[in-house]
Amino acid sequence: MFYQQLLFLVTCIASLFQATHATDIPGQYIVYYKEDVDRSFTNQRLFFSSESASSESVRVIYELEKGIVVAGVTDEQHQLLMQDKAVEKVVPDFYVTIDAVQRNPPNWGLDRIDQNSLPLNQTYIFNYNGTGVRVYIVDTGIRASHTNFEGRVTCGFNYFGGNCGDTQGHGTHVAGIVGGLTVGVAKKVQLVDVKVFGNDRSTAFSAIRAGFDYIIAEKKANPTIPMVINLSLGTVGIRYEYEEAINEAVAANIVVVVAAGNNFGDSCQHSPSFVQNAITVGATDELDRRANFSNYGACVDLYAPGVSIVSTYIYGDTSGARLSGTSMAAPHAAGVAALYLERYPTWTPAQVWTAMKADARRAVALIWWPIRQFLKFRTTTRLFLQTDTI
């Protein structure tokens, strides 16, 4: 009998946002400066001075904490930038996109994560609710006026300027799973909108990097506030820029939860799910089976509910929608991380992950095997189950 080992968490799933193409943005680069350079002087010299070789064609898109995003760069200018004594490295900016979304069946995720085995018992039991913890939703934005949020949403950062808000629905749905009053895991958590997608289903990685700069600065300014980042987005292929950003956040004592991806492929070949310091979450269905779209493999840390999950939406202040994806799995885990951090506010990301892993359990589901035309058992590991009520 064939037994397939899976990493399984029933507390989070994060990836409606999954990249379908790891495409570089033509002529657009992130220029990282060396630590000891004068940023203002170097910006002026490289991009704004009349003597600058790039001044006529290059456009400055955004200034990051450690560098600058520029567009309209020719191959020759790219080479000159890489050779400049003030420049640490020059990397291509690239697209980050979102996958298609399913809408349908019942809401069951909260019911699943607080019990050891099926069948579901129609209850969600919790002793903590995320009070005092901030979860940063790096996404399309959040409909802050939704009644499920009770005024607990703040507009932290909008890459495009102005107010936050959500025109796509993805970020609002993710935020609801983390901290909605009726549909969320951590029902009193503070939700911070980090809007990095506009009206399109893709954005530049530099927007994500700018969002991380904002969050890390917030942690430095508020070191005693427990913080979690949820990333329900991604890019096919390995992009080390994600790893650098996530490692900086974890070093600042911020828990980072990411979606495994919706490509039904190896999570180790997907970004940011390959990053070891992130908690990578795959998706399961109501029968504890890995969702047929979910990425899998050694880089998945846990599996959580991600099929037909009901949460908040953008059609009105009481609206909801049923969506599927690892985007829905990750916020289950992010919400649970917030519960742990309310109870143990000084815990490090490693301690939070250790507690989650300790609660992860083996599950066995009976499934139909069409190739051999008979029923078989599928064994899963690291299915997140709250053996001790959080």
Image (spheres, rainbow, N blue to C red):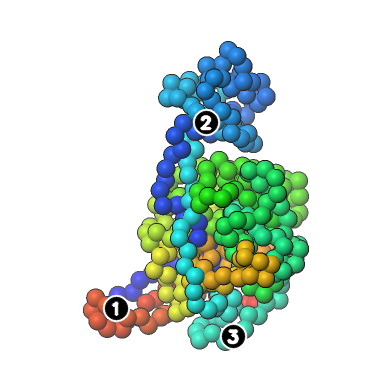
Which numbered disc, 2 or 3, marks the residue closer to the eye? 2
Q: Is residue 335 visible?
A: no
Check disc 2 and report its element: helix, strand or loop.
strand
Question: What residue lies at 70% left-to-right and 45% top-to-bottom?
Answer: 162
Earlier residue among tags 1 and 3: 3
Earlier residue among tags 2 and 1: 2
How far across and how far down the image is residue 340, in percent? 66, 66
Which numbered disc, 2 or 1, marks the residue closer to the eye? 2
Mark 2–mark 1 Cα distance, whole angstroms, equals: 51 Å
Question: What residue lies at 59% left-to-right and 76% top-to-bottom?
Answer: 110
Check disc 3 and report its element: helix, strand or loop.
loop
Image-based side of 51 in relation to 326, left or right: right
> Which residue in the rendered view is the most extreme toward the top?
51
Instruction: Kindly indicate whether the residue at mark 3 contacts the one at mark 1 (C-beta within 8 angstroms).
Output: no
Type of the residue with mark 2? Ala
Query: On residue 71, which mark appears?
Result: 2
User: Which residue matches tag 3?
Assistant: 122
Type of the residue with mark 3? Gln
Above/below status of 229 relative to 30: below
Q: Is residue 265 visible?
A: yes
Image-based side of 87 in relation to 2, left or right: right
Mark 2–mark 3 Cα distance, whole angstroms, equals: 53 Å
Type of the residue with mark 1? Trp
Question: What residue lies at 70% left-to-right and 60% top-to-bottom?
Answer: 144
Earlier residue among tags 2 and 3: 2
User: Which residue matches tag 1?
Assistant: 369
Q: Quadrant of the N terminus?
A: bottom left
Above/below status of 70 relative to 165: above
